[in-house]
Image: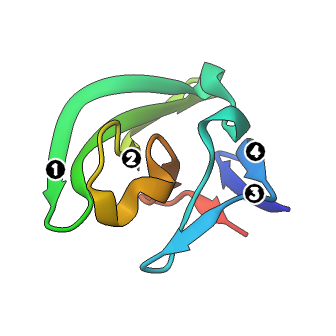
């Protein structure tokens, strides 16, 4: 079971993550949605498409744009459509 932890709280856990470029992508059903707030931030990956971001809010602390996902995705990466990955101090183990 792979877990994503931030501010001492498990915010996602799954045994169905997909690893791409060293990042675990969690199925949307396996994130704890109460900790995720959508943002307007978007970035572009040349081969995956346009990424959208979430802020994480746990125990009164906010980690801006600390999770990302691809709501629409290229054919090359269709296996992670909607899956969520983390950075900015989120521990994945």
Q: CA distance from mark 2 to mark 3?
A: 16 Å
Q: Position of residue 78 (x, y in %)?
A: 41, 55
Label 4 with label 3: CB-CB less than 8 Å:
yes
Which numbered disc flags the more N-terminal residue, 2 or 3?
3
Q: Residues within 10 Å of mark 4 (few under 14, many from 20)?
A: some
**Quadrant location of the N terminus in the rendered image:** bottom right
Left/right placement of residue 67 relative to residue 8 reads left
Which numbered disc flags the more N-terminal residue, 1 or 2?
1
Q: CA distance from mark 4 to mark 2?
A: 17 Å
Which residue has dot 4 on it?
10
Which residue has dot 3 on it?
3
* Residue 30 position by quadrant: top right
Considering depth in this image, is 9 or 28 the residue closer to the camera?
28
Which residue has dot 1 on it?
43
Q: Secondary structure at mark 1?
A: strand
Which numbered disc flags the more N-terminal residue, 1 or 3?
3
């Amino acid at each position: 079971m792979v877990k994503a932890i931030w501010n001492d709280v498990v915010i996602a856990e799954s045994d169905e993550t997909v690893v791409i470029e060293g990042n675990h992508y969690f199925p949307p059903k396996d994130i704890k949605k109460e900790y995720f707030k959508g943002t307007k931030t978007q970035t572009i990956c040349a081969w995956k498409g346009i990424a959208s971001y979430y802020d994480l809010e746990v125990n009164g602390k906010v980690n801006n744009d600390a999770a990302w996902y691809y709501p629409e995705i290229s054919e090359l990466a269709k296996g992670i459509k909607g899956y969520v990955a983390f950075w900015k101090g989120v521990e994945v183990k």
